[in-house]
Amino acid sequence: MRPGAKVNLKKWPTKVKPLCKSKKQYEKILEAHVAELSALQQLHYASNRYALLLIFQGMDSAGKDGAIRHVMSGVNPQGCEVFSFKQPSAEELEHDFLWRTTRHLPERGRIGIFNRSYYEEVLIVRVHPEILRSQGLSEELRDEKTIWKDRYRSIMDLEEHLHRNGTRVIKFFLHLSKDEQRRRFLERVDEPDKNWKFSLADIHERKYWKHYMMA
C-alpha cells in the first residue's frame, strides 16, 4: 500500500486460500522461515547499523499475540523486545500521545515489536471521545475538527524521522471479519485453556465494530 492511498477494508478479504495443505507442511515451512529469520537477526545485531520496529495492529482476537509468538520464536531474546500497549497509565497521560511508544523504540542492531501502538490514539480514542477528554488537553487542542488530522501528521512525521535515522518500520494489520471474531470469542468461552483470554470488555467493544472499521 502506497503512502497516501485510500483504504477500503471491505475490499480486502478476511479469508485467503491456505498456504499449506496440512499442519505438518505448515510446521516445516515455519521452521525454515524461523531459521532464516534467526540468521538474519544475527547479522542485523552484529552490523549494529539499523533498528527494526514491527507494529502489529488488529481488532480483539485478530491473532496479534499468536503471530508474534510463532513468527518470532527463533529470534534471540537478547536482541528483541515486545511491548504491549493498552490503557495508558497516569504517567503516560501527562505526556504527548507519542511519548509512551517512542520511549520503547528499539536501539540499533535490535528488533522492537509493538503489540498495538500509537495508532490506538487515532483508533480507540476516536471511537471513544470520552478518553480524549481525560487526556488533559486544552479545549483548543482537542478540537475534533483538527485533532485527528494533526495526529496523523505527527505519526507520519515521526515515521519519516525514524526512517531518516536508521529505524525501519514494518506494519502488520491482521484483518478478520466480525463473524470470525464472534467464533473466536465463543471458542475462548468453550475451551478451558482459552478462558483466560476471554474478557467482557471485548464483548462490549463489538458494539462499536462499524465505528472501528471507519476509524
Image (cartoon, rainbow, N blue to C red):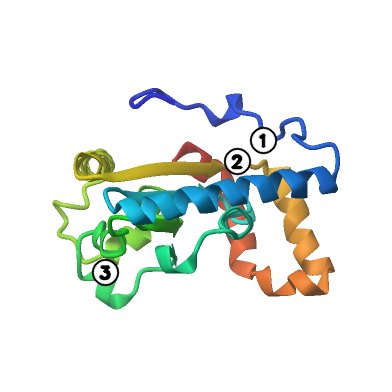
Q: Quadrant of residue 215?
A: top left
Q: Position of residue 163 (x, y in %)?
A: 25, 40
Q: Nearer the viewer, mark 2 or mark 3?
A: 2
Mark 2 and mark 1: Cα distance apart in space: 6 Å
Which quadrant is home to the N terminus?
A: top left
> Residue at 67% of width from left, 35% of height from top?
14
For label 2, the residue is 175
Give the quadrant of residue 85.
bottom left
In this orientation, does residue 79 appear?
Answer: yes
Query: How would you rate the neighbour count of disc 1 (Cα within 10 Å): few for under 14, some for 14-19, many for 20 or more?
Result: few
Q: Amino acid at mark 1?
A: Thr
Residue beneath disc 1: 14
In the displayed structure, 13 sits above or below 46; it is: above
**Which type of secondary structure does the marked residue at label 2 adopt?**
loop
Sequence-wise, the earlier of marks 2 and 1 is 1
The residue under label 3 is which amino acid type?
A: Leu
Query: Label 2 sits on what residue type?
Result: His
Residue 119 visible in the picture: no
For the residues labelled 2 and 3, say whether their Cβ atoms are less than 8 Å apart.
no
Label 3 crowd (10 A; few <14 / some 14-19 / many >=20): some
Name the residue nearer the viewer: 11 or 193: 193
For numbered disc 3, what is the local secondary structure? helix
Between disc 1 and disc 3, whose residue precedes? Answer: 1
Residue that mark 3 sits on: 93
> From what the image shows, is residue 129 above or below residue 33?
below
Q: CA distance from mark 1 to mark 3?
A: 34 Å
Residue drawn 43% across the image and 57% down it: 114
